[in-house]
Amino acid sequence: FLCDPSGFALPKLQVLGAQKSGTTTLFVDLHTTLSPRKDLTCHGLKPWGCKESTFFNWPQGRRYYELWGPCSRVRRGKVIADFSVGNLKWPYAAQGMHEEYGELAKDLVLVVGLRHPLNRMLAAFAHGLRENWLYIPSDRERTF
């Protein structure tokens, strides 16, 4: 993790990418092997802890470091990472990161996950079917 001049923790690892490009798999693998912090309350995210803060997706009235807490609460050797895939495409993300990290940006580690668009589309389709949020009309409902 990084510690800003006011004593607050910031993620040293920013995982950027597109949806369905493997960021959740990477998160689970890192969570299993590196055991990132579990005691930080972060943005009310449920089972994923601080996986996707989505902080930079739109301008906000609070500071990024408020999500991660003071450095004094972070044990050495623990990993703080943000896996908000939207940070790659949202127009506020690059500017917001620059403003929040300042001089610490030189120590930031960026990982970008990409995947062929057709494979991403097929994975999203399968995910929608599996999670039952994708509606497919029956033959009787079709109008063509």
Image (tube, rainbow, N blue to C red):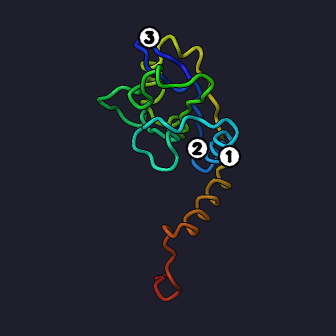
Any mark on residue 5, and which? 3
Amino acid on which disc 1 is placed? Arg
Quadrant location of residue 127? bottom right
Query: Of label 2 and label 3, which has the lower sequence position?
Result: 3
Query: Of label 1 and label 2, which has the lower sequence position?
Result: 2
Q: Position of residue 73 (x, y in %)?
A: 47, 25
Within 10 Å of disc 2 (Cα), the crowding (few <14, some 14-19, many 20+) is many
Within 10 Å of disc 1 (Cα), the crowding (few <14, some 14-19, many 20+) is some
Within 10 Å of disc 3 (Cα), the crowding (few <14, some 14-19, many 20+) is few
Quadrant location of residue 125? bottom right
Q: Nearer the viewer, mark 2 or mark 3?
A: 3
Alpha carbon distance from label 1 to label 2? 8 Å
Query: Which residue is found at the position 59% from the left and 22% from the top?
Result: 76
Residue at label 1?
A: 115
Any mark on residue 102, and which? none
Q: Position of residue 126 (x, y in %)?
A: 62, 65
State whether residue 86 is above or below residue 132: above
Residue at label 2?
A: 18
State if disc 2 and disc 1 touch (CB < 8 Å): yes
Query: Which residue is found at the position 50% from the left and 39% from the top?
Result: 50
Q: Please state which of residues 132 and 122 is positioned toward the viewer in this rendering.
A: 132
Amino acid on which disc 3 is placed? Pro
Query: Of label 1 and label 3, which has the lower sequence position?
Result: 3
Q: Describe the element under mark 3 as helix, strand or loop.
A: loop
Looking at the image, residue 18 sits to the left or right of residue 42; the answer is: right
Q: Describe the element under mark 2 as helix, strand or loop.
A: loop
Q: Please state which of residues 108 and 41 is positioned toward the viewer in this rendering.
A: 41
Instruction: Pick the quarter of the image with the N terminus.
Output: top right
Q: Position of residue 129 (x, y in %)?
A: 57, 69
Q: Nearer the viewer, mark 1 or mark 3?
A: 3
Marks counted in the figure total 3
